[in-house]
Amino acid sequence: MKKICVIGTGYVGLVTGTCFADLGNQVTALDVNEEKIRDLQNGIMPIYEPGLAEMVERNVRAGRLSFTTSYKEGLKDAEFAFICVGTPEGVDGEADLRYVRAAAESIAENMDHPLIVVNKSTVPVGTGDWVADIIASKQPKPIDFAVVSCPEFLREGVAISDFMHPDRTVLGSTNPRAMEAVAQLFLPLRAPIMMTDLRTAEMIKYASNAFLATKISFINEISIICEKLGADVIEVAQGMGFDKRIGPHFLQAGVGYGGSCFPKDVKALAYMAQTHGMHPQLLTSVMEINEFQRRHVALKLHDLLGEIQGKTIGLLGLAFKENTDDIRESPALAIARHLLEQGAHVKAYDPEAMENSRRAVPEIEMCPDAYKVAENADALVVVTPWNEFKQLDMVRVRDSMKQPILVDGRNIYEPDTMKSLGFIYRGVGRGYDGNGIERSAAD
Ligand code: UDX
Ligand code: UDX
């Protein structure tokens, strides 16, 4: 059993702290947001993540997990301090490290015994050294510490499973003993533990996310070519995936990737390259294709509806992906904003993300369910592939719409089935796309 302080109770910190507690460790989860900590102390979750509420409750009840806003209290007796604060996109795409700096400074000012500081937040290559410099410079008196990079590979919506069943744990440090100590925390997970230097560990995180984003932009570009050439991208992806060098995962064409990671991490990696005089052509193309893909879905609506002005358009889903309430860089909200700018009336339903979305785009008419979204709509767009959209009563949906136009941005329906029901159906890359969508020269 180890004593761990986790700093930041967001999508990464709260899952990390709770899972460490579930493995039998003593965890204090710290956040500067007093409201969040008060809610957590009252059993109210600040985020939606399947299975998290129950796991938090169980570990709080067992006395393994507690919450605080005080660094003195959080670091008391702790052997490890995990930095899990957000690293949002800054200007020019550079990662904004102000929260990492604040956490490092607070650790330095409040530690009263040797500590292993673990960077779990996604931080630019070289940040580990930077965090060490901050701590060394801010300590009132020198106390031993080490910095270890331990990048997170958690997908929202399946974060607990990803924590408990990692493909690998990556550790980076100049201090082998500290790395060994952190490795002990992950031994129960029985997954490969890779130990390397700080910069390499930080680069593994960026390169992994950038590669996954590249795979998504690749299949999205293929999907548009499929629409021109009459091929079905779902079967193309299936055929590709049998090749072990390609694999079947992350080849679902759709509305483009969103979330708090891929968009900012690809930008940050490109920025790091550019500040060292490089021109990261592939990363730049990955971002351009991703931007176009969400516009591609909106262009289908223009193609099908002609005039968007004054039309009612229903969106199924608002979160950036299924099984989360996270709307950061959500393609659904980008599409909603575009349609509102074109003078459309936008209705939407999302099982978890409506509260967050209402604050972000108040002009959207929120509906209690998918059927209400379809009522009197000129077109319906699937933007987040929630399971509950997959077996809707589509006859009821069709009969309640003004026009049976269905744009399936996530290919959750079968084109032939929808067309036989009388829908004017457009998927993404599902064979010829009617009149087809020309990429404008600007793209
Ligand atoms: C995580 C990782 O930290 C980030 O590197 C990755 O790129 C995205 O996922 P996330 O958990 O999504 O970030 O961030 P967020 O949900 O914003 O939570 C960060 C938490 O840190 C917030 O609750 C915030 O209040 C807290 N915080 C911020 C602190 O506790 N201290 C600070 O100084 C700043
Ligand atoms: C991602 C990485 O997967 C994870 O390893 C890292 O730690 C954090 O960033 P996350 O962003 O939570 O996780 O979700 P993910 O499932 O990777 O989806 C990212 C985006 O890509 C979502 O918008 C999703 O809808 C989209 N996506 C994913 C596709 O469009 N097609 C796919 O095949 C897979």
Image: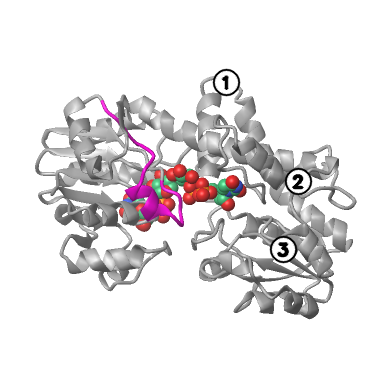
| Residue identified by numbered label 1 | 278
> At which x and y percent is residue 176?
20, 26
Q: Determine whether 323 is above or below 251 in the image.
A: below
Of the residues tagged 2 and 1, which is closer to the observer?
2
Q: Which residue is mark 2?
A: 232
Q: Position of residue 136 (x, y in %)?
A: 20, 32
> What amino acid type should be assigned to the residue bearing mark 2?
Asp
Quick one: 164 or 71, which is closer to the camera?
Answer: 164
Q: Marks 2 and 1: CB-CB under 8 Å? A: no
User: Which quarter of the rendered picture does the C terminus lie within?
Assistant: top right
Q: Nearer the viewer, mark 3 or mark 2?
A: 2
Q: Would you name the residue on which mark 3 appears?
A: 381
- At label 3, the amino acid type is Val
Closer to the eye: label 3 or 1 = 3
| Quarter occupied by residue 218 | top right
Range of residues picked out in magenta: 154-173
- Image coordinates for residue 61, horizontal then vertical, percent: 19, 69
Q: Determine which of the numbered discs, if any, sits on residue 11 in the image.
A: none
Residue 438 located within the stretch drawn in magenta: no
